[in-house]
Amino acid sequence: MTFDIVTIFPAMVEAALTAGVVGRAIDRQLLEVVIHDLRDFTTDRHRSVDDVPYGGGPGMVMKPEPIFRALDAISERRGRPVTVLLMSPQGTRFTQGDAERIGSRQHVVLLCGRYEGVDERVRSRVDEELSIGDYVLSGGELPALVVLDAIARYVPGVVGDDQSVAEDSFSRGLLDFPHYTRPAVVGDLRVPDVLLSGNHQEIRRWRKQESLGRTLERRPDLLENATLDDEEREMLRKLQNGSMTELQKGKTK
Ligand code: 4HQ
């Protein structure tokens, strides 16, 4: 899979792509990432990428032509189709489902805006406008790195164990269960006995129980779309009953 990242801060993006799972995948040529300095696509003496807003007001707007020239150069190099993603707080919220879907595309372009954002006409060349969350950042570079990382994990071979991607609790729509490693006792903090028991059936059930309990407590909204097996649906029913008053129980049962 290839990623082309268009930015006015190439060094910021470059640094983040040398470490970890993504860095290794680039070394192993499972991913090709090319970072494009938007200023290389300007034609004026000052290499301007922004200008004042029509209609007045504060802040600057990213000029359309350098972005169009960058996208033309990328399409030429990659051959169509390329999927163009614009990072923006006006976009739809980027989800695990989006990561999985986009993971099957051959060529993805990540457009990083700065200032007040891009000239509206840039959207005529954008396939999807994505937001990583409801807060304001100073540019699209960090969102682009977030989106690239989450997508890249779906490229075969990038994550060591394909199984762990498919079974990753978030892919299934639940929060993860608690993890422990050695030693079994730290001060007065003990690893739960069940994890030391060697009873794999019991361990599996305990982890399901913990995932469901945590999701119910912290992110009940996720349960609407979670894919649960029969055992999990039964566990959830009991957990929900446990947290309900006698009156509420009577009404749901
Ligand atoms: N920005 N999710 C403003 C974001 C953002 C977000 C990127 C700041 C675009 C122009 N992008 N620039 N949140 O806050 O994606």
Image: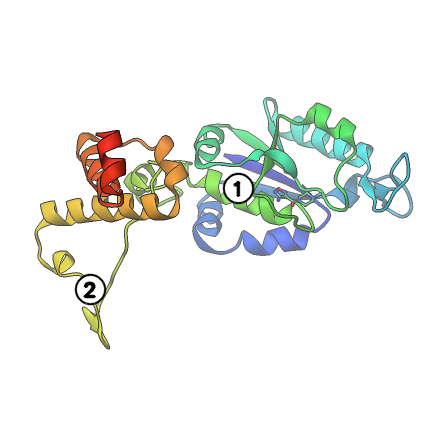
Residue 27 higher or lower than 240, as above or below: below
The spot of residue 156 in percent (x, y) is 38, 36
Looking at the rendered image, the quarter that the C terminus falls into is top left
Residue 145 higher or lower than 86, as above or below: below
Q: Is residue 192 visible?
A: yes
Q: Residues within 10 Å of mark 1 (few under 14, many from 20)?
A: many
Left or right of 25 on screen, residue 232: left
Say which mark, if any, is on residue 148. Answer: 1
The spot of residue 205 in percent (x, y) is 16, 44
Left or right of 132 on screen, residue 185: left
Left or right of 118 on screen, residue 252: left
Q: Which quarter of the figure has residue 144? A: top right
Q: Which quarter of the figure has residue 215? A: top left
> How much space separates mark 1 and mark 2, taking CA atoms?
35 Å
The kind of residue tagged 2 is: Val
Pick the residue in front: 230 or 42.
Answer: 230
The residue at 47%/35% (across/down) is 99
